[in-house]
Amino acid sequence: GHPSGVEAMTGLLSEHSLHTSQDIVMIHFPNLKTTASVALGAGLALVLVATSAHGQIGPVSDDDKALYTIGLMVGQQLESLGLSDEELDQLFQGLKDQAQGKDPQVDPDQQMENLNAFIAARMSRGSEQTKAGGQAFLDGFVEDGGSLTDSGLAYKIVESGSGDKPSASDTIEVHYEGSLIDGTVFDSSYARGTTATFALDRVIAGWTEGLQLIAPGGKIQLVIPSDLGYGDQGSPPNIPGGATLVFEVELIDIK
């Protein structure tokens, strides 16, 4: 598949976006695939602050508030699984049994295949729903004057720029803003007040293709379907699986 991160957006997302949940919570399950490990680790952290455990209305003390803040951050990882209250109760029960030294009600080693299948199915269900909304948005963008490439990338050239256009092997300097189709901005060089420079062959496929359509001084709007972006896995917590991405990009220079 396509790269899960891009130097533009690997730097962009890892350095400038909310990703503290994985920094704070490091729970290692050697038998789990990465997707399941991250999701389950986040889930266990979230239930540390489950209000059902102590009947709390909400955080009161400083410790309560610290724990609740961890829950908010790692809860973003769990959101794509669409867990019900009852399912979260099962998560909490497993954590409580382990933390109190009780005998487990299931053998974790025998549940790895089941667990990976559960995580994959839930993430796939969520990404398919997200893809459907993204496709409708992309279709509307094209109907409103956008162009569509053979790969499925939609774009509008705002300014063509002048001079040579970059090739996929070039390093470019850009200003950009990236958002979800609901307008939520997940990254912006404008907000940081500095341009970004990266190799065009180290970014998600939608960027590699789209930035070759304009020359320096040019500006382009891109609507990137998930198979040209971050795929079904997304880039948690800011980009859900299957998300269509919207970018406005200015090509400043070719290095």
Image (cartoon, grey):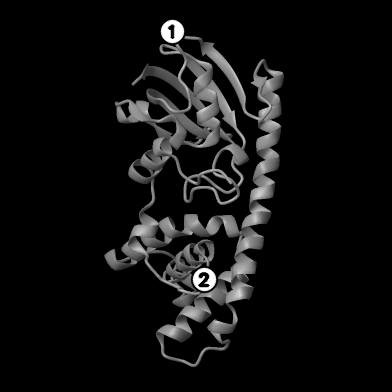
Numbered mark located on residue 32 in the image: 2
* Relative to 31, residue 217 above or below: above
Q: Looking at this view, name the residue that lies furthest to the left.
A: 62
Residue indicated by mark 1: 163
Residue 37 spot, x, y in % from top left = 49, 67
Q: Looking at this view, name the residue that lies furthest to the top.
A: 162
Q: Give the number of marks.
A: 2
Report the mark closest to the observer, 1 or 2. 1
Q: Is residue 36 left or right of residue 21?
A: right
Residue 119 spot, x, y in % from top left = 60, 64
Asked which quadrant contains residue 15, the reply is: top left
Element assignment for label 2: loop
Q: Which of 61 and 254 lies nearest the eye of the viewer?
A: 254
Q: Is residue 96 left or right of residue 25?
A: right
Q: Which of 206 and 51 lies nearest the eye of the viewer?
A: 206
What amino acid is found at the position of numbered circle 2 in the picture?
Answer: Leu
Q: Considering only order in the chain, which callout, 2 or 1, is on the residue closer to the N terminus?
A: 2
Q: Residue at x 63, y 74 (%)?
A: 114
Mark 1 and mark 2: Cα distance apart in space? 50 Å
Q: Is residue 99 left or right of residue 1?
A: left
Q: Residue at x 54, y 18 (%)?
A: 213
* Relative to 169, residue 134 above or below: below
Asked which quadrant contains residue 246, the reply is: top right
